[in-house]
Amino acid sequence: MHNPFVGRTVPLSGPATDYLPVTPSDTTDLGTVAIGLYIETGGTLSVITLAGTTRSISVPNNFTLPLAVTRVRATGTTATGIHAGVLA
């Protein structure tokens, strides 16, 4: 199989090289900084951005949020089926 990523730097803007399931937590950061989040069932997301700011964002079903995130907080998050797009 041809791999177009061999010998190239993967840009921070994506595409993500993997999606990891997210369990919202008020105390634990994601294992890898996400370059974006994919949300299956919409609602509210409470996140801590790479800049260290806590944000509350309303998102619809099947939504991709192109925002660098270090944590998805349990408090204030009602959206479910959250996946972190990462650069592995």
Image: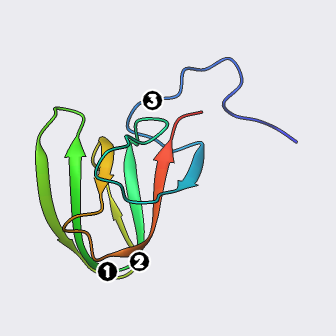
| Mark 2 surroundings: few (<14), some (14-19) or many (≥20) residues within 10 A | few
Q: Secondary structure at mark 1?
A: loop
Residue contact at pointers 1 and 2, CB within 8 angstroms: yes
Q: Residue at x 43, y 42 (%)?
A: 30
Q: Residue at x 24, y 34 (%)?
A: 50
Of the residues shown, which amino acid type is indicated by label 1?
Gly
In the shown orientation, is residue 72 left or right of residue 54? right
Q: Residue at x 35, y 54 (%)?
A: 25
Label 3: which residue?
11
Q: Please tell me in which quadrant of the rendered image residue 53 appears.
A: top left
For the N terminus, give its image quadrant. Answer: top right
Question: Which of pointers 1 and 3 lies earlier in the amino acid sequence?
Answer: 3
Q: Is residue 29 visible?
A: yes
| Mark 3 surroundings: few (<14), some (14-19) or many (≥20) residues within 10 A | few
Label 1: which residue?
42
Q: Between label 1 and label 3, give the one nearer the viewer.
A: 1
Residue contact at pointers 3 and 2, CB within 8 angstroms: no
Q: Secondary structure at mark 3?
A: loop
The percent position of residue 4, horizontal first and vertical second, equals: 69, 34
User: Is residue 81 depicted above or below 14 in this figure?
Assistant: below
Label 2: which residue?
62
Disc 1 to disc 2, how far (Cα)?
7 Å
